[in-house]
Image: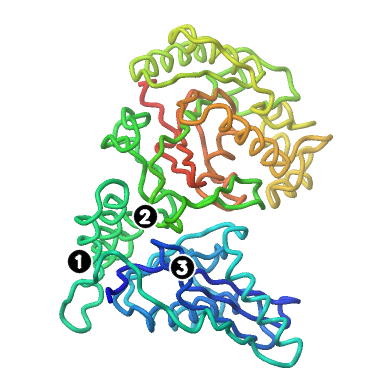
Amino acid sequence: MQRLVRIVVEADGGSRGNPGPAGYGAVVLDPASGETLAERAEYIGVATNNVAEYKGLIAGLTAARDLAPDAAVLVRMDSKLVVEQMSGRWKIKHPDMKPLAAEAARILPRAQVTYEWIPRERNKHADRLANEAMDAGRRGGQWEPSASSAAFTTVSAVPAPSGPPGDAAAGAAAARAALAGARPGPDAAAARGIAGAEEAQAGGAATADAMSPRTSATAPVSAEAGADTLFAEPGSGTGGPIPSAAPAPGRADQDRTATAPAGGQGWAPDMGAPATFVLLRHGETALTPQKRFSGSGGSDPELSPAGRRQAAAVAEALAARGTVQTVVSSPLLRCRETAQAVADRLGLAVTVEQGLREVDFGAWEGLTFAEVRERFPDDLQAWLDSPKAAPTGGGESFAAATRRISATRDRLLAEHAGRTVLLVTHVTPVKILVRLALGAPPESLYRMELSAASLSAVAYYADGNASVRLLNDTSHLR
């Protein structure tokens, strides 16, 4: 009987009251066949959601270790908190979480475990087990496993290599290398990526996060890497997709979800051509250097002479790259002028998309930040404190804009699958698209700055992941 070299753990926890009666569920799966290898669930009494989720993770990892102690483990959970904390990207501040995270980390060597966020609808098995455990607790008992979950059979096609006892990290990396050699094509590529991640993890957390496939938060490529990396074909070298694409944040942000590739349990990266949105902020207007609020409810200014020069420069830069296939613009004049300059140079038409318009800043239109603070101090502070707060006088909140822009993104992705599309738009839509791609919190919108006529790019993959390739590139203007 051959031994498993990789397995998937899906875990969840819940609390009816938060805190309230709580339970967890965990399932161990064979990624090649999708077979359930083990199930765990337990009613844990009164606890919070987060405690229950961590308990589910601990149970899942323990079951995985008991079944295949040398296997590489992919943990899939719909808890962003647990995934980010266990991946080392978020600090653990709550005193109840620290000992649970430490316990989970001790179960298997770090090099053997990677974490992936998945939307709740793709975590139904573990969610069902957690609810069964809570139901059992309500009846005064405990969850009982079904007969089918009591036994497991290894079905992996690749045997785990032998190695020195206790050297689990080396054994897991060697298993990945063996898998890469045994399976051609995408599976081999994925295995090589996992092996590289494990080696990186052995060397340090920062390197591991940069290499770990589909689990670590995506970092923008630095401008020093060269603007030509922005629109290179995926997998072609410097411009290929960043392997650490951030998972989509879920329906709370009206984000996309997708079913994992058949039979893969989400292990291998999506190998299809992504839809790439090249995000271009319009060129300067007379209001831009004065840093005045200029949304969709104001005077709709035209490009200034400097803005027209910027539009011409970015048109030349995009023509030199030769990858843009479609040009889509906000309906506002400054964007349509910028888009037309690019489209004329590329020999393309401009499609106007209402959903790409800037936020309506209401009574703040045309004012500087200092002027708004002087006239509407309470409204401005509320706006800075919450993305749900709207500008004075019936403006549009960032939360409402996020819903609009998310719907626009999804519609454009459906229309332009596998293509490179230039979206000529404004500061807020670009920030929102980048934020959603990174899975960053709403407050990150207040911490981004985008120059006039700057370029960013987001590649969207069929499995629901996205990667930001370059942020705020203005090299074409120098």
Q: Is residue 30 visible?
A: yes
Q: Is residue 202 left or right of residue 418?
A: left
Q: Which mark is residue 174?
A: 1
**Disc marking residue 35:** 3
Give the crowd class for mark 3: few <14, some 14-19, many >=20 residues within 10 Å: some
Of 191 and 149, nearer the camera is 149
Amino acid type at image mark 3: Glu
Quarter of the figure with residue 284: top right
Which x, y percent locates residue 23? Answer: 64, 81
Using the image, determine if residue 372 lies above or below residue 3: above
Here the colouring is: rainbow
Relative to 201, residue 189 above or below: above
Q: Residue at x 61, y 87 (%)?
A: 144
Q: Amino acid at mark 1?
A: Ala
Q: Identify the residue shown where x is 39% and y is 65%.
A: 114
Q: At numbered mark 2, what does the secondary structure look like: helix, strand or loop? A: loop
Side of 105 where 14 appears, left or right: right
Distance from label 3 to label 2 (Cα)?
23 Å
Work out which quarter of the rendered image holds the N terminus and state it: bottom left
Callout 1 environment at 10 Å: few (<14), some (14 to 19), or many (20+)?
some
Q: Quadrant of residue 141?
A: bottom right
Q: Position of residue 186 (x, y in %)?
A: 31, 47
> Pointer 2: what residue?
213
